[in-house]
Image: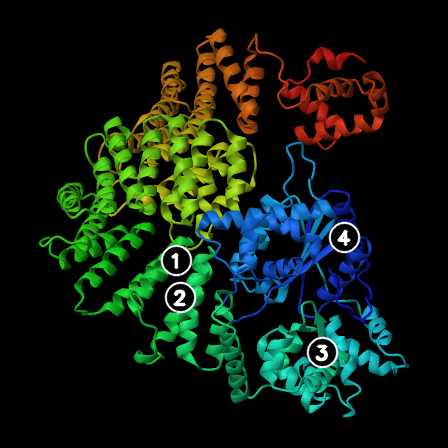
């Protein structure tokens, strides 16, 4: 790809250029890397990238550049990537590569990406295309102005950097000859800017780094200023420019350019400088630049020609003048770009209001004349709105929303729908778009659905409340009822259960059951769910049975399936029984045949939960895979049931001891999760906590920020309570447990199912403290903690005996209760082997980590009872699990127990180190140098040094001597070994 030629010299930035050149060199050798280039507006990001791209092209790399554009509140999905693809399509060398990815070609041609499955194919297609291009020649992808990126482009970038083009092979070796450089304005990123969380996520990836361009030093600015003028400059002029520029290269260039204006002074603001330079142009060139500024940062030649309405020769003369003054630069595909966004902004701001509106109207009509291309709808909406043609802006916004929906961009769909809603009341009723479903209330309902699909559940509630206010005293009672039961459903998704029940009750009362109608059936189905959530199970059962019969008579299979799900949960033993799961399977088939994906996902979610609750963990995963695949194909991965399925999938992997799979799945999910979906990654936090990652607790606390979320509160409570217990802080563990249970207890006083687990985790810390005080002879202190333990075990007993549906919990809940009973006994009178044996047996339903934790306590109890042989067996079994899982925190505890108890028969502890590291450790303990270690083990001294460094890191030692001491304490080396010289 050809590069824009810029005459401005690159002064300074040697360190940054060296660093980026190193990235290019590694990319050419097959190490894919990405650099996020940050800096304030005008600091020199574009100039640095121009230099780097020039060097890359000279070195034989393929250079692709995409720009993000500021379109105000509207978004043009995938714009920078569409620009890149357009450049590729014009080069015959890449025709075969493009043809291999139909989903990518469809986006390039303006076709629909389709549902979420199409979106995933697009993402994977672009990743595959870039990988294929890098096989032809090393590739540099440059993305400029990420602060203006639309959400779909941000999602695609997240995918490419976390799973796509930077993905490493199983052996750890990078696979692509590729580098990505992406720039953004740091000073534009206010606290709620949507790019901020993405940047925080990306910089944690191993293949991504951040480069911040700070203001230039005064000496460098002075060099830059002098280099831009052929003749001499007075020192006082240079000094004044340096002072005013404050290290900003663009400011310096503009201030210097303004010194030739002849007015003898320097403007006080950059905008004035830019406009003085602009006003040095001829009237015709100024007219062209004003028109181009309305188009945006970049404008096509033909579009500019038609908007400015000048003869071709005059237009070309004006463009040459603007390019000569470096206000515009020519780009590929007959386009022109403002050299800097600030220049365009200053020219645009100087337009008179009427002039601005007239030019926006001209661009809107020109785009309209090209035909109703779906991909231009967002631009047309922007121009119509700024030209005050609100009727056309409304129509274009709705068209843009439809396009965003088709290409799998729910966030953009929501934005365009909200723009349409803002315009609705300002447009005369006769000028509004007509058709089924096109009215303010129904648009609000559609927007609330888009908000839910993108994970903005509280926004969905707000939009439905607005629809409720808008429906007023409508004669259409069916629409009024629909708004109310939709609001009830949205309120349930944010755990506002009492209000949900109130609105579902209103909805049901507004529609008569006779004559039967589809609206009444759905109002009833929603009311059943809301009633169950507030403990009105008898009401739920009565309404569900009545509505099921009506749904069958009317032939409404999706509602019939939804009601079958509710009955499967409510009747008998619920979804834990085979009968309950058979009813759920029937509901799934009904929903599938009816084409109702949301109901099908609800059935699949309950099937998975039923398997989990009944202890059939392996049976749980296929249902989850099917449910998530169905959600992916329908574009509903961010809706409530798939979000909970994501969490449950990770929880099952965690419970089965497949911790590495759990962490990998969590990282894969992170790229597409909405802001409110952080809780789904919680099982990976459980893994991190067990493996000694101190950041796990901080990430759990972050889940509690923002509006209340039931699941986020649950998983944060588990993580933080367990973290307090592991660090031996019973006060914090009990406080965290109590606050979490209080937050999760519903308005009827029903305890959450997780209360038994939380109480048990807090009990472990309480028992530790009580046992320690008893050993020290502080009986009064031990008694106080024993009283706390009794309070906690009572809570666990109550929660295990009656879950939210009023029936006893399944195997998992009973296992946690068994452990709670054992911890309570330990707090009262010391460890009881039989209690811990029961706890170990209770977790024997597929769980891996929890029975090992119980075995550690069991071994302690056996040792205290002088049953040493049994203690050895249990300690060895626990240690094997902890070592295999990498659960270093409890691995150290069990090893300490083995050493302290001198448990004969336990094999030497070596789980932390490899076999070669153990050999090196033994020689290190004998005082050998790296060279001597190498000679004895037939390795180089450098390799020995690497092994020594690894040993120090694994043992947390700062020196060789400390490492030997730690190894002795941990039992990694025997005393007789250290005694030999």
* Mark nearer the N terminus (2 vs 1): 2
Which sits in the foreground, 529 or 761? 529
In the rendered view, tell whether residue 599 sits above or below residue 109.
above
In the rendered view, tell whether residue 536 sits above or below residue 888.
below
Q: Which residue is mark 4?
A: 61
How many numbered marks, from 0 up?
A: 4
Which sits in the foreground, 759 or 59? 59
Q: Which residue is mark 2?
A: 417
Check contact, mark 2 vs mark 3: CB within 8 A. no
Q: Which residue is mark 3?
A: 327
Local crowd size for mark 1, using a 10 Å CA cut-off: few (<14), some (14–19), many (≥20): many
Q: Separation of disc 4 and disc 3 at Cα?
A: 29 Å
Determine whether the residue tagged by mark 2 lies in a helix, strand or loop. helix
Determine whether the residue tagged by mark 1 lies in a helix, strand or loop. helix
Determine whether the residue tagged by mark 3 lies in a helix, strand or loop. loop
Image quarter hosting the N terminus: bottom right
């Amino acid at each position: 790809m050809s590069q824009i030629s810029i005459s401005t010299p690159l002064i300074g930035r040697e360190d940054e250029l060296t660093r980026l050149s190193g990235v290019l060199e590694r990319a050419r050798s097959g190490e894919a890397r990405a650099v996020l280039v940050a800096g304030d507006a005008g600091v020199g990001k574009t100039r640095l990238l121009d230099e780097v791209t020039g060097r890359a092209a000279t070195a034989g790399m393929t250079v692709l550049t995409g720009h993000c554009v500021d379109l105000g509140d509207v978004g043009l999905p995938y714009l920078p990537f569409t620009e890149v693809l357009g450049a590729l399509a014009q080069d015959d060398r890449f025709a075969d590569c493009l043809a291999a990815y139909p989903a990518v070609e469809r986006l390039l041609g303006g076709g629909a990406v389709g549902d979420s499955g199409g979106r995933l194919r697009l993402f994977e297609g672009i990743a595959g295309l870039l990988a294929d291009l890098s096989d032809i020649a090393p590739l540099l992808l440059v993305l400029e102005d990420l602060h203006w990126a639309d959400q779909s482009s941000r999602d695609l970038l997240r995918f490419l950097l976390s799973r796509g083009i930077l993905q490493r092979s199983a052996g750890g070796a990078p696979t692509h000859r590729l580098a990505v450089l992406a720039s953004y304005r740091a000073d534009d990123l206010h606290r709620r800017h949507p790019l901020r969380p993405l940047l925080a996520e990306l910089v944690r990836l191993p293949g991504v780094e951040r480069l911040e361009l700070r203001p230039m030093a005064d000496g460098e600015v002075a060099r830059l200023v002098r280099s831009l003028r052929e003749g001499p400059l007075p020192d006082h002029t240079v000094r004044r420019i340096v002072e005013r520029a404050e290290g900003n290269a663009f400011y310096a260039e503009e201030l210097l350019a303004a010194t030739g204006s002849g007015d003898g002074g320097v403007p006080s603001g950059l905008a004035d400088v830019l406009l003085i330079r602009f006003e040095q142009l001829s009237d015709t060139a100024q007219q062209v630049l004003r028109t181009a500024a309305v188009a945006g940062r970049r404008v096509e030649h033909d579009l500019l020609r038609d908007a400015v309405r000048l003869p071709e020769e005059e237009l070309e003369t004006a463009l040459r003048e603007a390019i000569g003054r470096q206000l515009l630069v020519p780009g590929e595909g007959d386009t022109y770009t403002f050299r800097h966004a600030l220049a365009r902004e200053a020219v645009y701001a100087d337009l008179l209001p009427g002039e601005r509106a007239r030019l926006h109207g001209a661009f809107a009509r020109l785009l309209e004349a090209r035909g109703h291309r779906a991909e231009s709808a967002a631009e047309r909406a922007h121009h119509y709105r700024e030209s005050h043609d609100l009727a056309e802006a409304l129509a274009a916004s709705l068209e843009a929303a439809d396009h965003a929906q088709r290409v799998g961009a729910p966030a953009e769909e929501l934005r365009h729908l909200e723009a349409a809603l803002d315009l609705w009341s300002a447009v005369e009723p006769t000028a509004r778009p007509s058709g089924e479903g096109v009215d303010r209330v129904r648009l609000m309902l559609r927007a609330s659905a888009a908000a839910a699909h993108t994970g903005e559940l509280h926004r969905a509630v707000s939009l439905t409340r607005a629809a409720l206010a808008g429906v007023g005293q409508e004669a259409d009672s069916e629409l009024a009822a629909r708004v109310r039961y939709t609001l009830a459903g949205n309120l349930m998704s944010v755990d506002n259960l009492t209000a949900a029940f109130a609105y579902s009750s209103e909805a049901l009362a507004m529609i008569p059951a006779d004559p039967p109608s589809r609206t009444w059936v759905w109002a009833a189905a929603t009311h059943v769910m809301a009633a169950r959530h507030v403990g009105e199970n008898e009401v739920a059962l009565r309404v569900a049975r009545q509505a099921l019969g009506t749904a069958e008579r009317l032939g409404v299979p999706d509602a019939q399936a939804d009601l079958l799900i509710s009955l499967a949960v409510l009747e008998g033993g619920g979804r834990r029984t085979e009968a309950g799961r058979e009813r759920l399977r029937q509901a799934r088939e009904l929903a599938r045949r009816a084409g109702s994906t949301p109901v099908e996902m609800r059935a699949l979610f309950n099937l998975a939960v039923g398997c989990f609750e009944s202890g059939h963990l392996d049976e749980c995963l296929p249902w989850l895979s099917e449910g998530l695949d169905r959600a992916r194909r329908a574009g509903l991965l961010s809706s409530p049931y798939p979000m909970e399925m994501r969490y449950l999938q990770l929880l099952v992997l965690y419970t089965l001891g497949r911790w590495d799979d759990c962490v990998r799945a969590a990282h894969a999910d992170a790229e597409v999760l909405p802001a409110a979906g952080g809780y789904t990654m919680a099982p990976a936090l459980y893994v991190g906590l067990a493996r000694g990652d101190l950041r796990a607790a901080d990430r759990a606390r972050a889940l509690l920020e923002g509006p209340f979320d039931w699941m986020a509160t649950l998983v944060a409570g588990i993580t933080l309570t367990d973290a307090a217990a592991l660090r031996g802080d019973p006060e914090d563990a009990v406080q965290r447990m109590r606050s979490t249970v209080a937050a999760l207890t519903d308005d009827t006083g029903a305890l959450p199912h997780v209360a038994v687990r939380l109480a048990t985790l807090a009990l472990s810390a309480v028992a530790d403290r009580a046992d320690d005080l008893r050993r020290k002879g502080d009986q009064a202190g031990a008694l106080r903690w024993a009283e706390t333990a009794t309070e906690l075990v009572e809570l666990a007993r109550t929660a295990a005996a009656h879950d939210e549906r009023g029936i006893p919990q399944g195997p998992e809940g009973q296992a946690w209760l068994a452990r709670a009973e054992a911890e309570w006994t330990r707090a009262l009178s010391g460890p009881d082997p039989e209690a811990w044996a029961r706890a170990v047996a209770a977790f024997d339903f597929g769980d891996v980590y929890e029975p090992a934790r119980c075995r550690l306590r069991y071994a302690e109890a056996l040792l205290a009872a002088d049953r040493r042989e049994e203690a050895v067996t249990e300690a060895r079994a626990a240690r094997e699990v902890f070592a295999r899982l990498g659960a270093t925190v409890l691995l150290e505890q069990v090893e300490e127990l083995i050493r302290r108890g001198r448990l004969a028969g336990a094999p030497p502890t070596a789980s932390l180190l490899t076999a070669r590291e153990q050999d090196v450790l033994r020689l290190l303990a004998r005082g050998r140098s790296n060279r001597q270690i190498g000679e004895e083990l037939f390795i180089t001294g450098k390799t020995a040094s690497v092994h020594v460094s690894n040993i120090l890191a694994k043992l947390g030692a700062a020196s060789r001597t400390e490492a030997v001491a730690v190894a002795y304490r941990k039992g990694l080396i025997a005393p007789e070994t250290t005694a030999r010289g």
